[in-house]
């Protein structure tokens, strides 16, 4: 991602495991899976373990290895536990507090439930207001808590938790991939449009795994079985050990996964909707070479997500591929949260140019996106300072122009460099010799084997569903003078 100081983030990653054979340490397996999914969320994480119907867990702010010390992980390890869920989070809905960390564990009159959510509801504000008016009490500000409350309320009225989830899906709008654990069942559910990925794996000794990406299956030794279909509810029942599904919400004609899963969010070694993420990114580079050819001496990528596209550009154009940057892997995420001066210096600290690759050469620089443009300008300056003769910037996505309501924290439109500017004007800001974006026509053709359509609303402004009202924070976290007039009395 070009803006290291202000990168885009996806909301989170979910995981669930049911070990039928009883040979796995399910808490340790969840830990390994969350490590593999850490790229999907670095703000908070959590694990919930089901020990013969008793569900307990631990969640906190921090990275997986920070939150789950050997002592904490040891406290979750139970020889009789056959099920566990896990979650990594980056907040796009709700503030950054421990109360919003997941899995959320809910204890109610029919038992206990642990729920993990990836995505963003577009009608969360409306649903929350309805629930609050009916007496519901919320501890955090995330839309996941809204889902928890609705599932719990429906569970008290329905004969099973899967039917309660199906009833809840009747009123949810937007993006959600869920992993839900009850005393006897592990359940995965995906919204009818399929905005966010969710897959199923099988364990060697028997049992099933659910995860946002197949790389998490690899981390626990599971084999990819298939993706959860958009709208599908998949149930693993410990009483039978078998997999079954409810497809009442399947079959929408407007299925559309977030295309940025293939461009940036997912790990390149993952398989999503039957298509390799690595190959999709190389295809983006090939398309870029076709759309924006240039005479140059070397093609380089911005680590990490620009590397595969750069390789594709090189293969298609015949221009040699080179390693242009070394990324410092030991700079913590907190570095970018310091002073303005630190943020300005973050690119130089995180990236160092391999001078021998670029000095005196015409360079094609490939990255997955330009957000605000400030960091792209700094990266280009690094190359020029290292002696690059020319810098031709190629972007493996169309220009960001519109907000996302489905779990990507694209900044305010006023902060997006592409909003209201032509490509030439953007290029003047970042300082490249030439600039070329991938076309919207080709961006939906990256994952050639994928059995789904793609959401491109952040590029085109064409939304399948859009919220009527968007608030950046929970109303209770806003100062009285910042609240809408009809809600100021909430503080009285």
Image (spheres, rainbow, N blue to C red):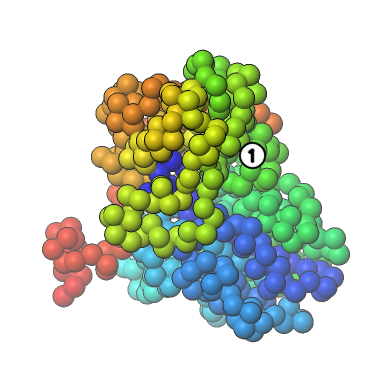
Quarter occupied by residue 430: top left
The reply to whether residue 479 is visible in this rendering is yes
Q: Give the left or right position of residue 265, taking residue 336 as reference.
A: right
Residue 482 image offset from top left, x and y in percent? 17, 60
Residue at 60 percent across and 81 percent down: it is: 72
Which of 485/446 is in front? Answer: 446
The quadrant of the rendering that contains the C terminus is bottom left
Quarter occupied by residue 444: top right
The residue identified by callout 1 is 277
Residue 193 image offset from top left, x and y in percent? 54, 42
Which of 159/321 is in front? Answer: 321
Q: SS class of the residue under badge 1? A: helix
- The relative height of residue 93 versus residue 259 in the rendered view (above or below) is below
Which of 109/376 is in front? Answer: 376
Which of 403/377 is in front? Answer: 377
Residue 56 image offset from top left, x and y in percent? 60, 80
């Amino acid at each position: 991602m070009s803006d290291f100081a202000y990168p885009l983030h996806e909301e989170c990653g979910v995981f669930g495991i049911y070990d039928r054979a009883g040979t796995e340490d399910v808490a340790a397996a969840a830990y390994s899976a969350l490590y593999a999914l850490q790229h999907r969320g670095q703000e908070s994480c959590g694990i919930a373990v089901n020990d013969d119907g008793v569900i307990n867990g631990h969640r906190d702010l921090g990275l997986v290895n920070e939150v789950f010390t050997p002592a904490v992980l040891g406290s979750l390890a139970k020889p009789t536990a056959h099920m566990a869920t896990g979650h990594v989070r980056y907040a796009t809905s709700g503030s950054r507090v421990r109360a919003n960390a997941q899995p959320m564990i809910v204890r109610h009159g029919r038992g206990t439930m642990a729920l993990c959510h990836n995505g963003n509801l577009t009608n969360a504000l409306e649903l929350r207001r309805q629930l609050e008016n009916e007496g519901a009490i919320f501890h955090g500000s995330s839309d996941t808590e809204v889902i928890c409350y609705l599932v719990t309320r429906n569970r008290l009225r329905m004969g099973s938790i899967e039917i309660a989830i199906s009833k809840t899906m009747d009123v949810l709008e937007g993006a959600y991939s869920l992993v839900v654990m009850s005393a006897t069942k592990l359940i995965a559910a995906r919204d009818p449009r399929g905005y966010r990925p969710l897959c199923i794996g099988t364990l060697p000794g028997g049992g099933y795994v659910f995860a946002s990406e197949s790389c998490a299956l690899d981390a626990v030794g599971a084999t990819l079985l298939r993706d959860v279909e958009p709208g599908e509810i998949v149930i693993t029942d410990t009483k039978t050990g078998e997999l079954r599904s409810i497809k009442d919400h399947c079959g929408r004609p407007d299925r559309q996964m977030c295309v940025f899963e293939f461009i940036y969010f997912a790990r390149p070694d993952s398989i999503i909707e039957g298509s390799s993420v690595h190959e999709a990114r190389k295809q983006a580079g090939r398309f870029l070479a076709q759309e924006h050819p240039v005479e140059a001496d070397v093609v380089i990528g911005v680590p990490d997500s620009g590397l595969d596209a750069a390789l594709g550009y090189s293969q298609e154009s015949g221009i040699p591929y080179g390693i242009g940057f070394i990324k410092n892997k030991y700079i913590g995420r907190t570095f970018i949260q310091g002073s303005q001066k630190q943020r300005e210096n973050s690119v130089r600290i995180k990236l160092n140019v391999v001078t021998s690759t670029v000095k005196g050469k015409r360079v094609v620089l490939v990255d997955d996106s330009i957000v605000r443009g400030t960091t792209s300008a700094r990266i280009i300056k690094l190359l020029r300072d290292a002696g690059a003769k020319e810098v031709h910037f190629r972007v493996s996505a169309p220009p960001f122009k519109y907000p996302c309501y489905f779990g990507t924290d694209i900044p305010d439109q006023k902060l997006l460099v592409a909003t209201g500017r032509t490509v030439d004007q953007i290029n003047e800001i970042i300082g490249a010799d030439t600039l070329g974006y991938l076309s919207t026509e080709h961006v939906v053709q990256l994952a050639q084997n994928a059995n789904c359509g793609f959401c491109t609303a952040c590029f085109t402004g064409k939304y399948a569903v859009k919220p009527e009202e968007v608030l950046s924070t929970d109303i209770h976290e806003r100062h009285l003078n910042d609240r809408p007039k009809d809600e100021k009395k909430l503080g009285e």
